[in-house]
Image: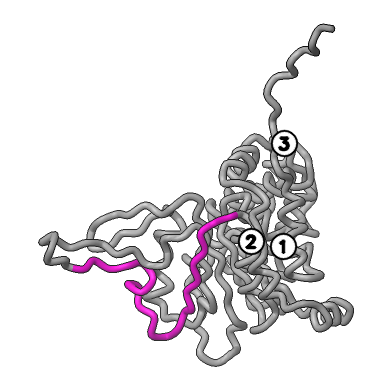
Amino acid sequence: MPRPADPGPRHTPMPSLSMLIDQVSTIIVGKREQISLCVTCLLAGGHLLIEDVPGVGKTTLSQALARSLGLAFSRVQFTSDLLPSDLLGVSVFERQKDAFVFHPGPVFAQVLLADEVNRAGPRTQSALLEAMEERQVSVDGVTHPLPWPFFVIATQNPTDQLGTHALPESQLDRFALRLSLGYPTAEDERALLSGHDRRDALQSLAPVMSLEDWRAWQARVTEVHAADALLDYLLALISATRDGRWFVQGLSPRAGQSLLRLARARALLHGRAHVSPEDIQALWAPAVAHRLQPVSSAGRGAAAQARALLEATAVP
């Protein structure tokens, strides 16, 4: 009896992004929408700013994302006495080699958690600018590339708390998204109280995809189509932020490029090959509010003002 034809090599299907969101959701309970935004941000190659009160899970979320992607994780507690060399590294003279040898700092990780970033002084905060924009650092005139991928997940406490400093505008513009976790619902908090310690569960997390899988997903983001009408809509929104009626200063070109990458990533996350206006609208406030200062006559915060501008701008 003849043998059946050889079907050829079997290809393992690439893990889905929903698997990543599902796993992180077992650690950060009841925050699936925020976790989806985090994954969207990382998929777009952006940096993430999480602003909230202490103790709601900001650090745990960062660790869960890094573990679920199998990425090297480094955490730096930002304090008022933290120096740039504590973050970037330092060159030390080694007598055996008769030369200065660079010792990398904690920034040389694939996921850097800058915990309570607004408790450090402006000099240390500025040390992150080159790393966040160019994925490299310069120490003693020598440029050192950072590993791929490189994400900064920064947490900050509300600026009305003691010992905090406002982040400079140049640094805020390098964060693709700013979000808040908020307090859990009564039902979710009961599950936290009655279940196992989330820190123990965190230690047992295994990567849901390989680095090659993640590289493939990021490559797919650039293939998501953005129609001319969609670009016109985005440009109309960006232009409205610059006319002086809504905000003191408008969005930078970098902000517009970042928002388009985020919209492509969100479309891919929802299984679409094209960007829709709903992608821009869903991401608008968390992507731009931290970059904008409302005019004094607005009488509302940047996020509320950004949403008002969105509602006033027609979809072409």
> For the residue labelled by badge 3, is the local secondary structure a helix, a strand or a loop?
loop
Q: Which quarter of the figure is the C terminus placed in? A: top right
Relative vertical location of residue 301 with respect to residue 272 in this rendering, above or below = below
11, 177: nearer the viewer: 11
> For the residue labelled by badge 1, is the local secondary structure a helix, a strand or a loop?
helix
Q: CA distance from mark 2 to mark 1?
A: 7 Å
Q: CA distance from mark 3 to mark 2?
A: 21 Å
69, 8: nearer the viewer: 8
The residue that mark 3 highlights is: 13
The type of residue carrying mark 2 is Leu
Q: Is residue 15 left or right of residue 124?
A: right
Mark 2 touches mark 1? (CB < 8 Å): yes
Q: Which quarter of the figure is the N terminus placed in? A: top right
- Farthest residue to the bottom: give it: 162
The residue that mark 2 highlights is: 65
The type of residue carrying mark 3 is Pro
The type of residue carrying mark 1 is Val
The image shows residue 142 at horizontal and vertical percentages of 25, 56
71, 40: nearer the viewer: 71
The residue that mark 1 highlights is: 24
The answer to whether any part of residue 233 appears in the image is yes
- Residue 74 magenta-drawn? yes
Rendered residue at 40%/59% (across/down)? 130
Rendered residue at 51%/79% (across/down)? 118
Q: Earlier in the sequence, mark 2 or mark 1?
A: 1
274, 65: nearer the viewer: 65
Q: Earlier in the sequence, mark 1 or mark 3?
A: 3
Q: Range of the magenta residues?
A: 70-92
